[in-house]
Each structure stands twice: as C-alpha cells, then as structure tokens.
C-alpha cells in the first residue's frame, strides 16, 4: 500500500499540480478573508513542495537511466 515514496497520503504529481492551480485561481479571484487567504497560501506552499519532490525524483530517475549503458553500448539511450 502507498506510492513509490512510501507515503500513502501524498498526492500524485498531477493531483498536487491540479490542486495548486485551483488554489492560485481562488487566491487571484479574491473575496476571501485574511484567514482563508492564509490557509490557501499555506496549502499552496505544501503543494508546491510536493510537486518539487516529484520532479526531483523524476530527474534522478532520468539521470540514472541515462547513465546506464544498454547492452554494453556507451552511447546515449536516445
């Protein structure tokens, strides 16, 4: 049970990105109380950090895949 990082409650990159976009839209629309705005801002910060974690993991996986020569060939995998 859980995802690749072992945390069952961590949203996928796509879920976090979509929710972050919604948070930004709500903040840009205005009409919120200060407390509502602060809560959304804090949620947005958390979502941005989750997205960054996913992207760093993807970069590391890509770098590892590119560093492995396939079938003994030292050429780039692409």
Image (tube, rainbow, N blue to C red):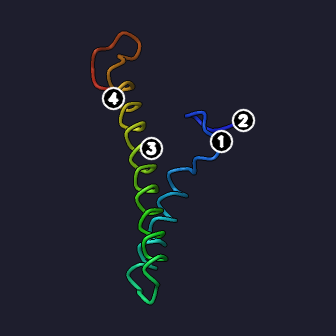
Q: Position of residue 1 (x, y in %)?
A: 72, 35
Mark 1 or mark 2: name the one nearer the start of the chain.
2
The image's mark for residue 1 is 2
Provide the residue designation for mark 1: 8
Mark 3 or mark 4: name the one nearer the start of the chain.
3
Mark 1 or mark 4: name the one nearer the start of the chain.
1
Mark 4 or mark 2: name the one nearer the start of the chain.
2
Q: Secondary structure at mark 3?
A: helix
Give the Cα separation between the discs numbered 3 and 4. Answer: 14 Å
Give the Cα separation between the discs numbered 1 and 2. Answer: 7 Å
Label 4 or label 2, whichever lies nearer to me, is: 2
Q: Secondary structure at mark 1?
A: loop
Residue at 37% across, 31% down: 60
Q: Callout 1: 10 Å neighbours few (<14), some, many (20+)?
A: few
Provide the residue designation for mark 3: 54
Q: Callout 3: 10 Å neighbours few (<14), some, many (20+)?
A: some
Give the Cα separation between the discs numbered 3 and 1. Answer: 14 Å
Q: Position of residue 18 (x, y in %)?
A: 50, 64
Label 1 or label 4, whichever lies nearer to me, is: 1
Mark 2 or mark 3: name the one nearer the start of the chain.
2
- The single residue placed furthest to the bottom in the displayed view is 31
Q: Callout 4: 10 Å neighbours few (<14), some, many (20+)?
A: few
Q: How many marks?
A: 4
Left or right: where does residue 12 sit relative to residue 68? right
Provide the residue designation for mark 4: 63
Residue at 49% across, 72% down: 22
Seen in the picture, residue 24 relative to 9 is either above or below; the reply is below
The image's mark for residue 36 is none
């Amino acid at each position: 049970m859980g995802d690749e990082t072992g945390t069952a409650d961590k949203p996928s990159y796509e879920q976090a990105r979509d929710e972050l976009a919604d948070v930004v839209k709500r903040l840009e629309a205005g009409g919120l109380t200060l407390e509502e705005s602060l809560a959304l801002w804090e949620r947005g910060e958390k979502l941005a950090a989750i997205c960054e974690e996913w992207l760093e993991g993807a970069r590391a996986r890509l770098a590892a895949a590119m560093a492995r020569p396939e079938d003994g060939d030292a050429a780039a995998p692409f």
